[in-house]
Amino acid sequence: MQPSWAQKKTNILFCIADDWGKHAGIYGDKVVKTPNFDRLAREGVVFTNAFCGSPSCTPSRATILTGRYPHQNEESGNLWSTLQTKLPNYATLLAQDGYHVGLERKGWGPGDFNVGGYTQNPAGNSYKDFNEFLEKRSDGQPFCYWFGSQDPHRVYEAGTGKASGMNPADVRVPPYWPDTPEIREDILDYYYEIQRFDHEVGELIKKLEEIGELENTLIVVTSDNGMPFPRAKANVYDAGTNLPLVFYWKGKIAPQQTNTFMSFVDFAPTFLETAKLPIPKEMSGKSLWPLLKKQVREHRTEVFPERERHANVRRGDRSYPIRAIRTHDYLYIQNLEPTQWPAGDPQLYFAVGAYGDVDPGPTKDIMLSDSVKYAYHYQLTFAKRPAEELYDLKKDPDQVNNIAQKSSYQAIKKKLAAQLTQWRKDTQDPRIDGKRPFETYPYYGNSAETEKMKN
């Protein structure tokens, strides 16, 4: 009996950066150089409104695999958690269908997948590199490869961006950070690692060409959440959730740039349809293939970013739960526990350190170095936030002027709040009924003291 893949099936190469915001040449950034991503974007389908499920590594990656929103994934709605085998997983389904499935470097995580019943990373078996993965593949077997770079996650080697030839004077510093030489160079160091990721994507494409599989491979390049800077990663503002994304399949997908919305719950159904497999009813996402084939122009009219516990940085293992709706014109946010600190407690609780949901680095250090001089930036990033936030994106693309209490916006706010509530009910958000399971789930990350001893 022939294996199921005897009839040629499509390969999938999924390239995911770690903490890469929407910084690429194709998106208008004039400093960072991303020739390989830009080439795929020109020749494939590039999204301007792709949004992760949560601006945090573990829940975002779980959303990609399961096609379910973070609050539907139980423990994996938190960072440093686990992922249960009872939840659908496109990588598992492809492997069961005969695909050669594997990953390099960072797959699902961080967390403890053994607790959830997995004996390997939920994204597949780990391999040293693409060459080793291909060596283990049977002749003609379709494959699904997850290339999980650690770039551009912190820590950075200071000065690498400037030394590579990028000019700090050319950097755009968003208004929620102070404009200082140190912060400009911190951004360049982040750009340097984006360029390293882009180079490695180029090497993978070359390998596909060498083995004659480029025309039979769907290539997807994206990130898990926004850049590891204040008010970006671990926040549902666009800097934390609106990410680079391109779909490329040589000769099979016509070029287009689309501003329709895409949610990361849509990856799993899309990959399953690519493999001609049924989409489990437990998945909340929907396949992008009608859009990729230009059968429709609009995929979604809005998305729903959210977050639960990122690092364990609040007394009582508390989360900072957020639910939000993002349309073309507005971002509406509900901070469900506004008495908590959005960036973590000002004093060390368990993990990382003060304001531990913001990754340590020069930009954070400068903003905390002078509470008077940088009071405006501190308020936007570290201070407590109101229960509701509303941003008019046409007037305020950087999302710094909260208009939730303005009388002229009350009708819009009411409409968006109703949409958000309905989505929460439809997707069975446990918090809609007052439940708070995310504080009770174990945190498998190390304490700050353990990390200090390791270093």
Image: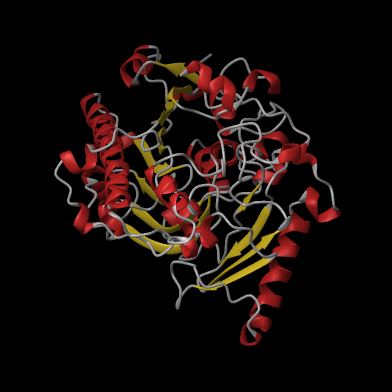
Where in the figure is residue 427, as x and y percent of width and height?
Answer: 74, 52
Q: Is residue 145 above or below residue 317?
A: above
Where in the figure is residue 141, as x and y percent of width and height?
Answer: 41, 20
- Where residue 116 sits, quadrant-wise, is top right
Its colouring scheme is secondary structure
Q: Is residue 240 above or below residue 85?
A: below
In percent of the image, x 66 and y 35: which residue is there? 349
Asked whether, in this view, residue 285 is left or right of residue 274, the answer is: right
Asked whether, in this view, residue 128 is left or right of residue 40, the answer is: right
Question: Which residue is at the far bottom?
Answer: 408
In percent of the image, x 26 and y 51: which residue is there? 43
Nearer-the-camera pick, 396 or 91: 396
Asked whether, in this view, residue 75 is left or right of residue 132, the answer is: right
Q: Quadrant of the C terminus?
A: top left
Where in the figure is residue 186, as x and y percent of width and height?
Answer: 32, 45
Q: Is residue 18 above or below residue 305?
A: above
In percent of the image, x 28 and y 52: which residue is there? 184
Where in the figure is residue 17, as x and y percent of width and height?
Answer: 40, 38
Query: Would residue 420 be visible to someone looking at this image?
Result: yes
Q: Is residue 311 above or below residue 334?
A: above
Query: Would residue 96 be visible to someone looking at this image?
Result: no
Labels in figure, total: 0
Nearer-the-camera pick, 147 or 414: 414
